[in-house]
Image (cartoon, grey):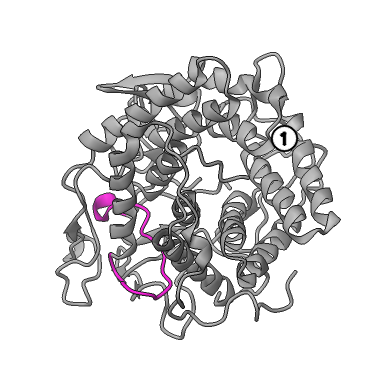
Amino acid sequence: MPTNLTASSAAFTRRRLRNLPAVAASARRLPTPSPAGTCAPRHLVDRALAEPVARAYHYLDVVQDAYVKGGEPRLLQSYNNESELLTTAFVYDNALAALAYLANPTVANVRRARLIGDALLWVQAHDERYADGRVRQAYAAGPMRFYGDGPAFPGLRREGGRAAHLWPFGFGGSSTGDMAWAALALAQLYVDTRIAKYLDGTVALGLWIAGQESGHRHGGYHGGRQADGETPERWASTEHNVDAYALFALLAKLTRDRAWTARADVAAAFVRRMWNPAGRHFWTGTGEDPEVINTGNVPEDVQSWGLLGLGEDRYDAAVDWVTTHLANTDGPVSGVTYSSQAKVVTDPVSGSALPSNPHAVWLEGTAHTALALLKRGRTGDAGRARQLLQALVTAQETLGAGQTVGRTGDPHGGRLANPGEGGTWTGAPLPAASGIVAATSAFETGFGFGYFGRQHVGTTAWFLMAAQNFNPYQ
């Protein structure tokens, strides 16, 4: 998943169509939302979550409207203005936001999900270099000027009509996991609306992922393409292959094309090879030597996503590994952290002078874990999930105050620019107790990036899905 990088950090590398005429034409205003959006909202896990959920949706609405309002397709800025990432909109976070809206598919929420989906289709069709179905790691959500006299972008659409992917930050790559999440969001939009262009976009992304099949002995799909857009990653991620499996299984149902089942089997076989029966958890995947399993750092996400995505009971002990080995308490908030190394690292967070707090709670992962517990459904799991969800509410109500989003007072269209270089990034205040920060304190994951106490679209979206027991993989 995308990182909470500072501007000085390197890009995070986690992670055949001949043309795309039906996938996305020009960005245009949405028509009247489909009647499919009138279906009843999903039930909350707990009625006490009604107000926090409403506030979280309000946060997403505010961020979505921070630069553009109305029916114009657009992406959400992933973090608050003060994050030092300017108007960066990670594709992963936007896919989650669309899915969170679809977790409660009112007319208004489906309309907002479609704004994101149509923006994803637009960038897919308007890349400056590729027409093979991929999208990039991140784009500009609004006006911004890069550090050190770097280029300025007016927003999602660059001069010349091309999509403004953020190559100066190193966000020009396409990871397999990010592509799968974008495709899952489009697929779920198709399920809700039955509008063919969303399925077309899903298929295009799925075919691109299928082209990343690894030729090494553990199989699966490798990590995608690096920031230059060309160089393939050598490693393969268990998490990415869970994502790919879920996507391909869904495409098999939607298209009735058995080729997707075969592609899903490739991903599932890799995931099963990464199971550690002695430790009862998944390894993160292979390393830079793709023949060797990386056993040096065990992350949370693949443990919960393995259950949510594969849906196989034989792996449900991985959730217990998370709650046992990654449990953390930081002030009033108790949850889980990112990985086994995050529990012990105290050096400065990558790209920052801040020390890593080994007691920090990774709030996105806490939401993953709550949803996985609800999915598993053993005795006591629902109660533990509610405790984690309440911890997220505590974070929502106590952390992240004073942060802003949207246009600034800069005379150049209200753009965000480094205050140290004569710019500003102070926008409009975010609504109180609405968005959820990525982490309770700054911490290093052990994978070369960190998270900070910044309000985060992705974390808030995962809270919304968990609070409504909505599995985005299915």
Picture quarter with the C terminus: top right
**Which of 315 and 217 lies nearest the eye of the viewer?**
315
Q: Position of residue 428 (x, y in %)?
A: 17, 60
Per the image, label 1 sits on a secondary structure element best described as helix
The residue under the point 52% across, 71% down is 123
Q: Would you identify the image quadrant in which residue 334 lies?
A: top left
Location of residue 106 with respect to 240 vertically, above or below: below
How many dots with numbers? Answer: 1
The residue under the point 69% across, 25% down is 313
Residue 69 in the magenta stretch? The answer is yes
Please give left or right for residue 415 compared with residue 357 in the image: left
Q: Answer few, some or many: residues within 10 Å of disc 1's Cα (few below 14, many 20 plus, some between 14 and 19).
A: many
Q: Would you identify the image quadrant in which residue 160 lies?
A: bottom left
Q: Which residue is mark 1?
A: 271
Q: Main secondary structure of the magenta part?
A: loop
Residue 209 in the magenta stretch? The answer is no
Location of residue 462 with respect to 76 vertically, above or below: above
Please give left or right for residue 389 compared with residue 40 in the image: left
> Looking at the image, which residue sits at the far bottom?
160
Q: Position of residue 473 (x, y in %)?
A: 61, 45
**Which of 26 and 156 lies nearest the eye of the viewer?**
26
The residue under the point 33% across, 74% down is 70
Highlighted range, magenta: 66-84
Location of residue 461 with respect to 160 vertically, above or below: above
Q: Position of residue 89 (x, y in %)?
A: 41, 59
The residue under the point 71% across, 38% down is 289
Please give left or right for residue 96 compared with residue 87 in the image: right
Please give left or right for residue 381 compared with residue 265 in the image: left
Q: Position of residue 35 (x, y in %)?
A: 51, 66
